[in-house]
Image (tube, grey):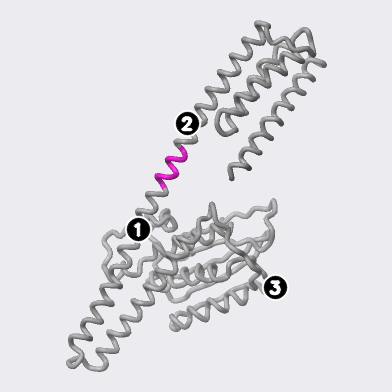
């Protein structure tokens, strides 16, 4: 929330609560003759305003306004100001103390929460940088090694050996291109500050484009598609969501050992499109499930060949893109075996309806 909007919100909240408290006290005094509760209700109002607003100003403003309102309407002589009375001075001191202490405590708590959030961001950045350095180093080393081998042994290598080395170089170069695309998406998108530009995209056209690219890269994988028969339009950044789907499909192709079939399913429910990419492979280690989308993907006891295809950066990019679209993403192991990645996108303007991923 911007500073101006925050100030407007705080001012509206302060004035609104003071008016509510004032009229509640008038009703209590008129119909129930409970004047003893008036100071306590005003103190409660000052406490709530100090708790819910930023800084000290509005709490102190509310305490002074409460003293004036209480002196004017609820202290004899009624509907006249008498600020020099002992009761008014005592009320002012008490309410100012309540406002100052509450504002001080809430400000301190908010600062601690902000520091904690910044610390978490720094931790995630550090984990992501570790993942980047680890994932980039191996394909670069392989590319350098293959090129050096060809240059140094060009005359002694057979054509088949040269083609094999060049093929491996191309595969590693494609891997680097995907990593760079994912990194650009992560750095481009900050879901708290940047709103993606959404345009209406036809679901069937999106899926066709994704499958064309995926099957070109993995023609041997049996990919089953299930989408609604209805004409579905989803507001999105088509390039970014296509990247999410490709990342998840490629992730299954690379990591789902023993997979015989890959399933891409899209359903629509309550104004949301639910995308599911599932496989019948080896599944995901349970200790890695909580950290898949956080960038906290540590390489423990994995070979260099496996680690060069690490899924950490790609899944972090997927989470950032889906979150920027206002959706949710999660992953779980299927009861019948294999893993499932699932995310949601809105198919219409936000309504009061909500959807569960369960």
Residue that extends furthest to the top in the rendered view of this protein: 86
On whether residue 114 falls in the magenta region, the answer is: yes
Q: Position of residue 231 (x, y in %)?
A: 69, 73
Judged from the image, the secondary structure of the residue bearing numbered disc 3 is loop
Q: Which mark is residue 129?
A: 1
Residue beneath disc 2: 108
Could you tell me which residue is drawn at 31 percent across and 81 percent down? 168
- Give the distance between the C-alpha atoms of the residues marked 2 and 1, in whole angstroms: 31 Å
Neighbour tally class for label 2: few under 14, some 14-19, many 20 plus, Cα within 10 Å: few
The correct choice, above or below, for 279 with respect to 104 in the image is below
The answer, for residue 333, to whether it is visible in the render is no
Dot placed on the residue nearer the N-terminal end, 2 or 1 = 2
Q: Residue 131: give x, y in percent of width and height.
A: 34, 60
Q: Magenta region: which residues?
A: 113-120
Find numbered disc 1 in the image and state the secondary structure of the residue it sits on: helix
Question: Could you tell me how far apart the alpha carbons at marks 3 and 1 are, in whole angstroms?
Answer: 43 Å
Q: Residues within 10 Å of mark 3 (few under 14, many from 20)?
A: few
User: Does 333 appear above or below 280?
Assistant: above
> Within 10 angstroms of label 1, few (less than 14), some, or many (20 or more) residues?
some
Q: List the residue tagged with mark 3.
A: 230
Depicted 218 relative to depicted 349: above or below: below
Q: Nearer the viewer, residue 258 or 106?
A: 106
Residue displayed at 44% across by 57% down: 293
């Amino acid at each position: 929330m911007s500073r101006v909007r925050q100030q407007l919100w705080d001012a509206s909240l302060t004035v609104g609560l003071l008016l509510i408290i004032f009229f509640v006290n008038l009703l209590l005094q008129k119909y129930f003759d409970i004047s003893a509760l008036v100071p306590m209700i005003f103190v409660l109002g000052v406490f709530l305003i100090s708790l819910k607003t930023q800084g000290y100003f509005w709490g102190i403003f509310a305490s002074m306004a409460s003293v004036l309102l209480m002196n004017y309407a609820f202290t004899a002589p009624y509907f006249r100001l008498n600020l020099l009375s002992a009761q008014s001075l005592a009320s002012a001191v008490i309410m100012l103390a309540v406002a100052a202490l509450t504002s001080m405590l809430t400000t301190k708590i908010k600062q601690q929460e902000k520091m904690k959030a910044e610390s978490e961001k720094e931790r995630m950045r550090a984990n992501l940088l570790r993942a980047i350095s680890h994932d980039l180093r191996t394909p670069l080393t392989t590319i350098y090694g293959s090129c050096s081998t060809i240059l140094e042994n060009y005359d002694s290598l057979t054509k088949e050996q040269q083609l094999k080395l060049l093929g491996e170089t191309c595969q590693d170069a494609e891997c680097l291109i995907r990593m760079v695309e994912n990194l650009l998406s992560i750095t481009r998108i900050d879901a708290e500050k940047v709103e993606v530009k959404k345009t209406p995209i036809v679901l069937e056209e999106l899926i066709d484009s994704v499958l064309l690219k995926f099957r070109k890269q993995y023609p041997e994988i049996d990919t089953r598609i299930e989408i609604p028969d209805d004409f579905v339009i989803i507001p999105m950044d088509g390039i970014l969501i296509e990247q999410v789907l490709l990342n998840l499909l490629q992730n299954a192709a690379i990591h789902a050992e023993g997979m015989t079939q890959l399933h891409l399913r899209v359903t629509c429910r309550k104004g949301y499109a639910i995308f599911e990419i599932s496989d019948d492979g080896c599944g995901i280690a349970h200790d890695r499930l909580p950290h898949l989308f956080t960038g906290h993907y540590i390489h423990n006891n994995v070979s260099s060949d496996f680690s060069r295809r690490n899924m950490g950066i790609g899944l972090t990019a997927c989470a950032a893109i889906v979150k920027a679209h206002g959706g949710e993403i999660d992953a779980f192991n299927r009861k019948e075996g294999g893993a499932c990645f699932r995310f949601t996108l809105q198919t219409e303007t936000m309504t009061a309806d909500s959807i569960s991923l369960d």
